[in-house]
Amino acid sequence: MDAQKVRQTMDVQEIKHAVQIHDYIEKLEKLTKLSLKNSPIMLGLPSQKITLEIPKQSKPCYEYVEQLYEDISDHDLLFKAMKTGWQYIDSNYKKISKTKEEYFQQLNSSHGLHIAKERGYLIPDSLLRKKQFCYGQYEAYYGVHEIFYGNALGIWLSKSNFYNMHSYAKIYENVKLITSQFIVPSSVDNHSIPYMLDQLWVVSHAVNQVRLMGLEIAGEHNFFNGLQGKTFGEENYLKNLGYEMYQVASWWCRVDPYRVISEFLSVSGIFPDAINHLIGSELNSIDKYVCAICGAPMVRWGWDWIQECKIGNSTLLAHKHCANLD
């Protein structure tokens, strides 16, 4: 099979994947009796933005925190690092500490809970064996990974003039670290099962200030308890620790993780215009993710799976496969 036929076969598989995802969400709607397709992407926002002061450096901080750059995945470690006078957090150009493949393996093996147990938390063996894998978590991480490694420049509108988008460029200056399965002590006591934040974003706010943003993916296992995330009811506790908590819909992550992350970038103020620059930002319900050429459902799991195409005098959205054939 030549390269063109291989590519076309892969494109058709992407359309099949889109149909499967839409069918899956429709079944979830029937089971939960919830209007998931028309739900907001952002299910929960913090009551306020929180800035934390970092002391000015009095001496080089490397002896304290160099060993933490690779994966700061624990509340105590992060705050220890900040208290040493980390004027700004520099992850040595590795803002995201894990590859997509490493993250998938660790998520699928309850890696975060194993680390928590090593650090003194009382984790029952049953939780270490039990796998509550949420594909939305992986897809959200996948989208973040592709955006921050520059692999998804095609999600932005051409008229946005990417290379002159000052506010977008500041992401790379202000976002210092994104770590997954971040361990935060329970409000009960320091040895109980901790909160495992799906993502923690460490963002500089000023020369000596940072914001800590927890991004929680409300997964499939949350659907049957009123869409309550694992930090439900503990927002004040987490706020008092210094965390801004954002909750997003897992089913939206499965349809369009790039849109989910763009919404988060916008509402958090990291990149206020992100959603306005995203191709397909007008698709404000899952039912609207439909190819303008073939009429089949669309998803944007790969950054280029949804493309703009000209039909007459109109610019419409279509599958990559259909846009390339048109």
Image (cartoon, rainbow, N blue to C red):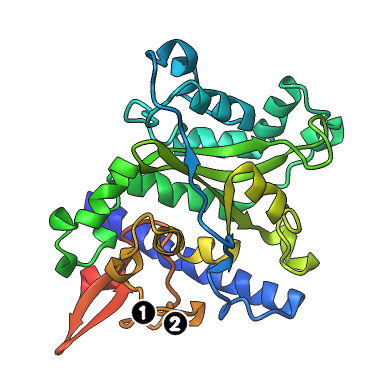
Residue visible at 66% across and 31% down?
111
Residue at disc 2, secondary structure:
helix
Which of the pair 159/91 is nearer the observer? 91
143 relative to 271 in the view: left or right: right
Against 278, residue 148 (above or below) is above
Q: Which residue is mark 1?
A: 282
Residue 87: give x, y in percent of width and height: 38, 29
Answer yes or no: is residue 33 visible. yes
Q: Please state which of the two labelled residues, at mark 2 or mark 1, is closer to the viewer.
A: 1
The amino acid sitting under disc 1 is Glu
Q: Residue furthest top?
A: 63
**Up-down relation of residue 23 to residue 256 (above or below):** below
Q: Is residue 199 left or right of residue 196?
A: left
Which amino acid type is shown beneath numbered disc 2?
Lys
Task: Assess whether mark 1 and mark 2 are in contact (beta carbons under 8 angstroms).
Answer: yes
For residue 288, which numbered disc appears in the image?
2
Q: Nearer the viewer, residue 301 or 11?
A: 301
Query: Residue at 66% of width from left, 33% of height from top?
Result: 112
Residue 31, percent from left and from top: 76, 75
Give me the disc on residue 80: none
- At a point 78% along the width and 67% down the height, the residue shown is 224
How dense is the environment of label 1, judged by Cα within 10 Å: few (below 14), some, or many (20 and up)?
few
| Relative vertical location of residue 156 with respect to residue 104 in this rendering, above or below | below
Q: CA distance from mark 2 to mark 1?
A: 9 Å
How packed mark 2 is, by other alpha carbons closer than 10 Å (few <14, some 14-19, many 20 or more), is some
Task: Determine if residue 71 is in view.
Answer: no
Residue 206 to residue 220: above or below: above
Quadrant containing the C terminus in the rendered view? bottom left
